[in-house]
Amino acid sequence: MRTQVGIIGAGPAGLMLSHLLHLQGIDSIVLENRSRKEIEGTIRAGVLEQGTVELLKGTGVGERLVKEGSVHHGIELQFNGRRHRINMNELTGGKSITVYAQHEVIKDLVASRLHDGAQIYFDVRDVRLLDIETSSPKIRFRKDGVEEEIECDFIAGCDGYHGPSRKSIPESERKEFKHTYPFGWLGILAEAPPSNPELIYSNHESGFALISTRSIDIQRYYLQVDPSEHIENWSDDRIWTELHKRVDLKDWKLNDGPIIQKNIVSMRSFICETMQYGRLYLAGDATHIVPPTGAKGLNLAIADVQVLSNAMKKYYHEQQTELLTRYSEICTRRVWKAQRFSAWMTRMLHRNFEHSPFEYGLQLAELDLVTSSQSAAKSLAEQYVGLPLEY
């Protein structure tokens, strides 16, 4: 097989890149080791920045997003038994975020790509990258037990942290940074009506909680727990007791209902600054992971492939290589800002039980400043709705 861009991974990054390249008349083939049913059914969070929403709508894959997504003009921060609203719309000149789950974005992109005749190979095995330092890199894989090979001009590694793409770059050439947070999130999906029109981030002496939404009858809630905890130790009653304790107010109570899914995830930051090597370009979780507190993961992936697709357009249509050469530089600048914001939100909102009373007092003072100073609130709002894409 022969294509211009071989894309490994059918997550938001890989599918969106394939879609953007198609709009520029650039061919691609997408490989995915999971089934279509699995990638469309894996429930993931989805807080979309203003720029992400505009890109999806502007490129023809935002119809269902407009109908079913929930536009939020602010968020609420809760601490010391009081709730404070950050009016992002007002503070950012009319910008907002949209709650629309990641797997719904994937459904829309898969449907669009298949409608346009894209080649997407699901359930592939044993993916290997070859000759990435040459002008004719190759991808070998097995599909239904048959060995296949794709020869291409470029390879886009959009295959997540555990995929083969980043590992194909010699370890000595990879510049990587890691940080693990002493917090875990216990997330649940519950059959219940919405409790609040906007997201609630609660700092409580017992730990952090996040109240989010998925639809008019399915809600997404999170609790801070020890990352070594086992989900079997958390009965439904225990979860609801903790959630009510951390978010209920005298005149407001959380809506609860049957829990249909629950799991515990650890929180970490990771950056591979080497986002390009030879003819291989990394995007999305293959090259960076952020704690979910700042709601940046999916948005960073979309920003990566927006830069990469523009760079490839310049290469194919104008014979310019400057953007391809600067790809890592452009993207990592944005990634580090998102890491900083996500780490700041995480430290400000989670209860670190190793901290002294003095350190806890500083944390509450930080929250007080953010909710009482317009300048501080504006900084949070600008980063939350998404910083402009800079080249």
Image (cartoon, helix red, strand yellow):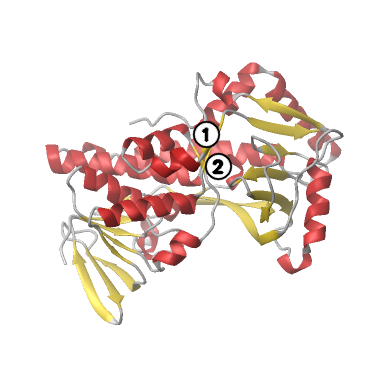
Q: Which residue is rendered at x = 35% and y = 61% of the image?
A: 165
Q: Position of residue 293 (x, y in %)?
A: 61, 43
Q: In this view, does 54 lie above or below 93?
A: below
Identify the element where label 1 is drawn.
strand
Residue 308: x and y, percent?
29, 43
Q: In whole angstroms, how far apart are the C-alphas of marks 2 and 1? A: 10 Å
> Mark 2 near mark 1, Cβ–Cβ under 8 Å?
yes
Which element is circle 2 on? Answer: loop
Q: Where is residue 263 in the image (x, y as percent from the top left)?
A: 65, 61
Query: Is 264 situated above or below 345?
Result: below
Report if residue 173 is visible in the image. yes
Q: Which quarter of the rendering shows the C terminus?
A: top left
Crowding at label 1, few (<14), some or many (≥20) Cα neighbours within 10 Å?
many
Q: Position of residue 158 (x, y in %)?
A: 37, 55
Residue 97, label in figure: 1
Kindly identify the residue that appears in the image at 40 percent across and 68 percent down: 35
Q: Would residue 282 be visible to someone looking at this image?
A: no
Q: In which quarter of the image is residue 2?
A: bottom left
Mark 1 residue type: Ile
The residue labelled by disc 2 is 295
The quadrant in which the N terminus is found is bottom left
- Judged left or right of residue 65, residue 83 is right
What kind of residue is marked 2?
Ala
Q: What residue is rendered at 46% in x and 66% in y?
A: 38
| Of pointers 2 and 1, the one earlier in the residue sequence | 1
Within the image, what quadrant is residue 75 found in?
A: top right
Residue 33 occupies which quadrant of the picture? bottom left
Residue 81's tag is: none
Work out whether 296 lies above or below 94.
below
